[in-house]
Amino acid sequence: MMEVQNKQVILKGYIDDVPKESDMEVKVSKIELNVPSQGQGQGQGQEQEVLILVKNIYLSCDPYMRGRMRDFQGSYIPPFLPGHPLEGFGVSKVIHSNNPDYKPGDFITGFTTWQEYSLIPITDQLRKIHPDPRIPLSFHLGLLGMPGFTAYAGFYEICTPSKGDYVFVSAASGAVGQLVGQLAKLHGCYVVGSAGSNEKVNLLKNKLGFHEAFNYKEELHLDAALKRHFPQGIDIYFDNVGGDMLDAALLNMRVHGRIAVCGMVSQQSFSKPKGIYNLFNLITKRIKMQGFLQSDYLHLYPRFLEDVSSYYKQGKIVYIEDMNEGLESAPAAFVGLFHGRNVGKQVIRVASE
Amino acid sequence: MMEVQNKQVILKGYIDDVPKESDMEVKVSKIELNVPSQGQGQGQGQEQEVLILVKNIYLSCDPYMRGRMRDFQGSYIPPFLPGHPLEGFGVSKVIHSNNPDYKPGDFITGFTTWQEYSLIPITDQLRKIHPDPRIPLSFHLGLLGMPGFTAYAGFYEICTPSKGDYVFVSAASGAVGQLVGQLAKLHGCYVVGSAGSNEKVNLLKNKLGFHEAFNYKEELHLDAALKRHFPQGIDIYFDNVGGDMLDAALLNMRVHGRIAVCGMVSQQSFSKPKGIYNLFNLITKRIKMQGFLQSDYLHLYPRFLEDVSSYYKQGKIVYIEDMNEGLESAPAAFVGLFHGRNVGKQVIRVASE
């Protein structure tokens, strides 16, 4: 049995505010590069988890992970365990497995842990990747992964778009927003995005094909910015940020508008969130405001994979990644999400393919 | 032509906060008891309004009317005109008409003005009443009128109820809430209502058939009150009040819960509404929160009228009215809505039937 060093990113303790680098630490442990022999210490009749040993190639930094850093059991996914590596989506290569469906060298994507090598259970959420030279492997964490599917399910299922709709997307160059905007444009909608730097605004207009975009940090009044970009009002707001932008969007929705509540990355604290003041517009404009999770729509995943892969290969959509090198860069990259430091989907390259 | 005195309730000027009696004044003007002869001063080719002269029997006090007392054109219904009588739903008797469909003595319901006699246009929103001795005429302003239809459309169309759902209704003894609760119970749901006095709580439990009810003014923590009444959480929240109760309900919704946003009678000010802090739950619980107006569902009105009249005549539902006597009592009765002084649907009897 070969034992190797295994770098890992550990959660030090639970937090309530925006994550800081010091909330995590990079440690080096050791791991044997094989699946432990089965049956040890397990009682009879007990369902046995089938494990595989993988080498993590790419790890995904996603804002939802922050929700797992707090000491709160009531959410849709349990909190991380302090003292243990973070968990998140990854693209990994099988190193050792006793299951013939997962052979050494196979690429898989699904939940893994933030270390160089992980021992992970085979669940129905693991997906084998059939590498396609036209699609970067890391795209299985973004365009073809959870964020891309979030955009797809949220836009089509929650926003119920029609051709000609006026669509606003916040955090529009992010992992989810950039695909929402492109899907909306393909659908015949008019699309405006907001982002937090002129570089991102430039990408939105010149690379991602948004009709218009603005830097919210340069706007004194978000309400005025939205009125300038949507003199006729907004039919669909795909909300990735919550807070003041949501409040301003509420003032600018059209009758029967729809708000897909996807994320609230602007919130600085779970226990002291910012107030939203303009919900009265829900009534006067008969607005539907709906939160959602992609995991409720997994029956649509095969169609999503086919549609979006096909759009990408035809050059109808593009996808921007922000790739950091090395597991030690992961804490800073993750923290950067909450300060808008990433440009596009934030991924960590842990090892070469 | 007979000219008579005509008492009226005039809006003195626009307001932003909760209405006060001094925002209105009762005046006496004069009116001729016939429809003015047509064609005077109207240009050729111009659509001519056909008017009828009615005697108002019952006038409806509804919280939405407050929205018409502010100087804001962007809502679904235009503001009142200062110096003129308020407008609202009424049950009226035709006094004079040149239209054979509306004969003297006919009872109608629809928009009228807050005076003893009104000259009102015949629109497709006017409805002739076929008096039924088993149903009080004033119920056309409540159970069978706009509030009742709001309850019906909101509950069935927005809340998409299932048998066994846990349903919470705020302002539950009010014009809308009392019917929502009874429809929910008939549908096989578990129903809890909140109200602002022990008298109302008593009515909810002992007359309106709610499974449970509580006086929110006696609760230190609304979150704790809801957790006590809904240990399993809330599937449907029919929100008539907004504010703190909405915020507490958000904390207690179940996965895939639905919030029908019907009213925000708790709001003290349009320009300085209270903040809502718990919208993050929309995402984690995948909640749909939807504002609505009954006027979008008028295609369901005939079915509503049939269903609810039939329930009432079979004794399956009851309806509580708060009847004030005389037009001069209208300002105080209307203001009382915003302080919970009404017990049941607030109506003004302007004249005997």
Image (cartoon, coloured by chain):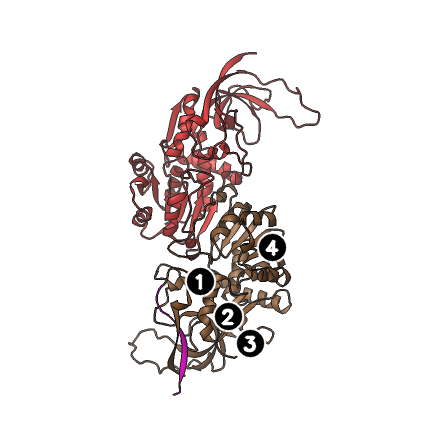
Chain colours: A brown, B red
Foreground disc of the pair 4, 3: 4
- Front residue (pair A163, B134): A163
A67 in relation to B325, above or below: below
Q: Is mark 1 on a helix, strand or loop?
A: helix
Q: What residue type is labelled 3?
A: Pro
Q: What residue type is labelled 4?
A: Val
Residue position marked by numbered label 4 in the rendering = A191
B154 in relation to A112, above or below: above
Q: Is mark 2 on a helix, strand or loop?
A: strand
Chain assignment, label 4: A
Chain assignment, label 2: A
Label 2: few (<14), some (14–19) or many (≥20) C-alpha neighbours in 10 Å: many
A133 in relation to A252, above or below: below
Chain assignment, label 1: A
Q: Which amino acid does label 2 sit on?
A: Val
- Front residue (pair A131, B247): B247
On-image quarter of the N terminus of chain A: bottom left
Asked if marks 4 and 2 fall on the same chain, the answer is yes
State which region is magenta: A1-14
Residue B341 locus on image (x, y percent)? 36, 31
Residue position marked by numbered label 1 in the rendering = A64
Q: Is A53 positioned to the left or the right of B75 in the image?
A: left
Asked if marks 4 and 3 fall on the same chain, the answer is yes
Q: Is mark 3 on a helix, strand or loop?
A: loop
Q: Is A327 positioned to the left or the right of A305 in the image?
A: left
Residue position marked by numbered label 3 in the rendering = A131
Q: Which label's residue is closer to the chain start, 4 or 3?
A: 3
Q: Which mark is residue B1?
A: none
Residue position marked by numbered label 2 in the rendering = A347
